Image (cartoon, rainbow, N blue to C red):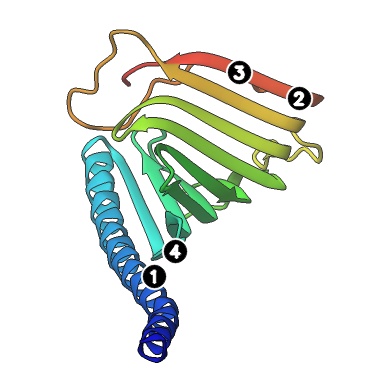
Amino acid sequence: MSNSTVPSKASRRRLWPVVVFGVVAVLVIAWTALWFYAAAQAKTEFSAWRERERQAGRQQDCASLSVGGYPLAVKVHCAGADLEMQELPGYRLALPSAAGGIEVYDPRLMSGEITGPLTISQRGGGVDYSANWNVGQARLRGVPPQFGSATLLFDDLSVRDRVSGGNGPVLAARRFEAEGRRAVGSHDRDGATGYRRCGNAVRARPATSIAAHCPLRRA
């Protein structure tokens, strides 16, 4: 009796690692499939957002677009970013790269990284303005396209006016921070993500830090 029972218990003990491994493998495969689905949805949503921006008068292009961040985030990376806005007719804004994404544990927070320098130039002309920084970050909180708040952070920011020909920067700050919140009662009727500019944080002399706070309103 004891001789038949002992092998049976030993067999069950040997099977446990196999069962655990099988469950983990199934979970990893399911999570991977879910992540790739979310990545495909992110590309679709990004394309829809660009179309909404185009209809609002803001043309945005990427030399290359990729999605990464596996396994705990979905991040969209845009290399060679170009932007033309109706608020700046005839001008083109260019960035080497910009990336944004969400973490699975906090889907209402979208964070991004902005790589300088930013150049502003007239179509077919030279650079009129440029801005550079060491660290550039953006945070949007809420459900797109109607975000409730937005924050821009730049470390060691320097802005230069190429038109005037001056050697020094027109704005220099060890830390620049701009924060806005959606104004009570504001609505985004056509789905565009434009907000009216408010506040002016530009200073013509170096500063340790600059902060601007204002409500976000529909442009």
Disc 2 versus disc 4: distance between alpha carbons?
35 Å
Disc 2 versus disc 3: distance between alpha carbons?
10 Å
Which sits earlier in the primary sequence, circle 1 or circle 3?
Answer: 1
The amino acid type of the residue labelled 3 equals Ala
Disc 1 versus disc 2: distance between alpha carbons?
49 Å
Q: How many marks?
A: 4
To which residue does mark 4 refer? 70
Disc 1 versus disc 4: distance between alpha carbons?
17 Å
At x 37%, y 11%, the residue is 183
Q: Which SS class for mark 4?
A: loop
Residue 95 position in % (x across, y down):
53, 53
Q: Could you tell me if residue 204 is visible in this image? A: no
To which residue does mark 2 refer? 209
Between disc 1 and disc 4, the foreground one is 1
Residue 102 left/right relative to 120: left
Which sits earlier in the primary sequence, circle 1 or circle 4?
Answer: 1
